[in-house]
Image (cartoon, rainbow, N blue to C red):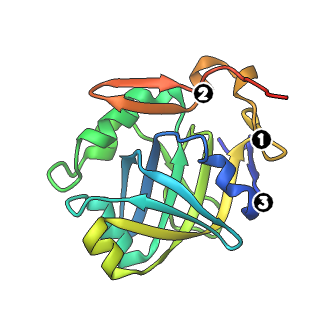
Amino acid sequence: MTSHIEPVELEKAYRLINHGPTTLVSSHHDGIDNVMSASWVCGLEFKPAKLTVVLDKSTFTRKLIEQSHKFVIHVPTAGQAEMVHYLGTHSRSGETDKLAASGVQLFQLPDSELPLVAGCAAWLYCELIPLPQNQNDHDLFIGEIKGAWADNRVFKQGRWLFEDAPDEMRSLHYIAGKRFYKTGSLLDVE
């Protein structure tokens, strides 16, 4: 399962999300895992590498992050679109078997308790920089990226290779309802 996973330099980790993909957010606290979909994720700084994510007050994952101060941002693939939609439209608050029902498969990297979603194109492990006013007033969370990895079939030497990837390995971009776009073709400029 992890044979295609390679580390990404932290100063280049922003490249994993700078194309605006729909993401998954996972966290773990007190023996409980959860994963949710999130579209509002953005790179913030290169050094130290940081990102932002908007997490509504009603989400179960937000509560886990507020308690553990750790989370993972994932870049799911087009082959995972149904799972991504399910994880974004169901809450663990009212559906304790949400993860099993979604079909998500979790794994952990050595020396980590955080759940990572198998089959994604990239993973960014973050530690929360607590800013209660931002979190309460704007649902805005800032994470310092402490580790980043990507599937070397679609990301190598600091660059996405979607133009050579099969459709199911391309990243997703959520539009509305049940509609996503897949990352498209390459366009170089002079």
Which residue is tagged 1?
159
Q: Secondary structure at mark 2?
A: loop
How far apart are the alpha carbons under marks 2 and 1? Answer: 13 Å
In primary-sequence order, the first of circles 2 and 1 is 1
Which residue is tagged 2?
170
Front-lying residue, 88 or 15: 15
How far apart are the alpha carbons under marks 2 and 3? Answer: 21 Å
Badge 3 density bin: few <14, some 14–19, many ≥20, Cα 10 Å: some
In primary-sequence order, the first of circles 3 and 1 is 3
Which residue is tagged 3?
9
Residue 31 can be seen in this image: no
Q: Which quadrant of the structure image shows residue 33? A: bottom left
Residue 104 can be seen in this image: yes
Name of the residue lying farthest toward the front: 190
Label of residue 72 in the image: none
Q: In the drawing, does residue 59 fall left or right of residue 39?
A: left
User: At x 58% / y 26%, what residue is drawn?
Assistant: 183
